[in-house]
Amino acid sequence: MYNQDQTQQTGSFTTLNNTETDRNNIFTNVNLKHEFNRETGHEINFDFDYSDFNFRNVSYLNIFQNQPGSTPSLSEQNLRQPIHIYVGQADYTLPFDSTFKAEMGGKTSFATINNDLKFLRGQTVDPSQSNDFLYKENINAGYLNLSKKLKRFDFNAGLRAEQTVVSGETMGKRELDRNYLQWFPSASALYHVNDHFGLQGSYSRRVNRPGFQQQNPFAFFIDSLTYQQGNPQLLPEISNNAQVAVTYDNQPFIRISYGKTTDVIIENAPRLEGTRTFTTSANLAEYERWTFELNFPIKYKKLIDGFGGNQFIYNAYDAEYLDTKFNRSKWNWLAYWQVNVNLPAEFKVEIGGWYMTKFLEEFFDISAMGGLNIGVSKTFWDKRGRLSLSVNDILYTQNSKVHVDYSNVLVNFNQRNDSRNARLTFSYRFGNTELKNARRRNTSSENETSRVKVE
């Protein structure tokens, strides 16, 4: 802690946060599929999902003033958070002929999240830092998609409509009550230059809904001067995206993409209240992103195969926050690669990694970072058995150094995770390896369950 002009240190303290987390999840899915004509793909599909998440998080907090003989301050933060999600979906595919088909369907989902937080100082509940927030959400959607092949062209066009109904109550008081309809068109065209190369263009309007926990209004204790707080008034982000690409074997070789997002959810917008700093999720900005991408295959006879790529990325934010204009932009470079070396005696070596220069993420300036991964594997017993050893982030460079300097908020922090690890895996495939794999499909509730933060 320093005086106001940051010329003299006035004190210091240490916060020990010992957190115990219990979480469990039950997921059920019923899928029914009827094929009117297997050869043409005329079919109807039904999905019914139920997901139940239960989180319990207890943080035992000890704050020590860094002075001889000081008495620690003991407190406890106790969060219980049951989440229930019900989803039903129907999808119908109608081929008119071998080149033209229609896909249509509907979906409805219901989510209930009960956030119960108790903050105890010693053995006494502090009502000013405790709360109970009940969030309910119902989303109803319908879509129509048409696709057509015409000589060397593939065309696709679609339209999706979503109705959103949400409510939120804190201690019996209604804080949130919304009911609105949104439309999401999309279109794409692909021209096959030859058997390998193609030219592609596309446009889509998409929605990115906030995570369920982001809408929790509680202030979560990080230390006695720093808190993280959710926002029940968050709106979904809406993005318009367009791209043109040269494809090779249906994969992007050269691609230029542009996206503009409104109601951008700034996850860690900082503000000061006295001597305390809060970071809060809020719809603050418009966001623009340009990406220039070059991907290429890596191959040398049968010995080496893989891929590499580069992206030049431009991020720009335009926001009004804390009576100050936040208008920042920055270019950065991202490189990535994956190389496989096929050795004798069924050995394989895999080398992969990525590197990104300093970049801008919301209010954060984040220093350059990257990672290098290496793996060795061997197959045996007629390729039924596989033994592999992988080491991730060998150089331990996948760490974040962050700087925030906005209005009267100045924050610097380093974040180190257990990204460097080794894993030894053995697998063996039983039965008839020539059998056809079960069909792969997404369940109807994946969009909803992905909004549950489990870390």
Image (cartoon, helix red, strand yellow):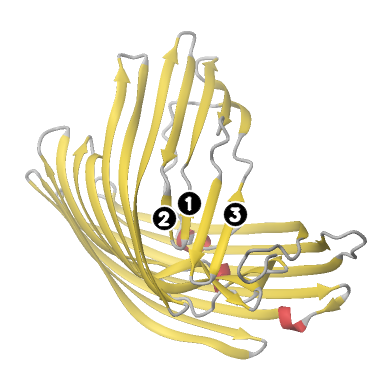
Quarter of the figure with the N terminus: bottom right
Real-space Cα distance between discs 1 and 3?
10 Å
Label 2 and label 3: CA atoms lie apart by 15 Å
Query: Does the CB distance between marks 1 and 3 fall below 8 Å?
Result: no
Q: Secondary structure at mark 3?
A: strand
321 to the left or right of 35: right
Q: State if disc 3 and disc 2 touch (CB < 8 Å).
A: no
The answer to whether the residues at label 1 and label 2 have Cβ atoms under 8 Å apart is yes
Closest to the observer: 429 or 283? 283
Q: Which residue occupies the foreground of this view, 226 or 216? A: 226
Q: Earlier in the sequence, mark 1 or mark 3?
A: 1
Is residue 85 left or right of 354 when viewed as pictured? right
| Upstream in sequence: badge 1 or badge 2 | 2
Q: Furthest-right residue in view?
A: 69
Reading the image, the residue beneath label 3 is: 413
**Mark 1 element type:** strand
**Residue 245 pos. (x, y %):** 19, 45
- Place of residue 119 in the rendered image (x, y in percent of width and height, measured from the top left): 77, 74
Residue receiving disc 2? 360
Residue at image position (87%, 72%) is: 122
Residue type at numbered disc 2 = Leu
Secondary structure under the numbered disc 2 in the rendered image: strand
Residue 198 in sight: yes
How packed mark 1 is, by other alpha carbons closer than 10 Å (few <14, some 14-19, many 20 or more), is some
Q: Residues within 10 Å of mark 3 (few under 14, many from 20)?
A: few
The mark found on residue 366 in the picture is 1
What residue is rendered at 50% in x and 18% in y? 383
Q: What is the quadrant of the C terminus in the image?
A: bottom right
Q: Amino acid at mark 3?
A: Phe
Q: Amino acid at mark 1?
A: Ile
Q: Residue at x 53, y 20 (%)?
A: 377
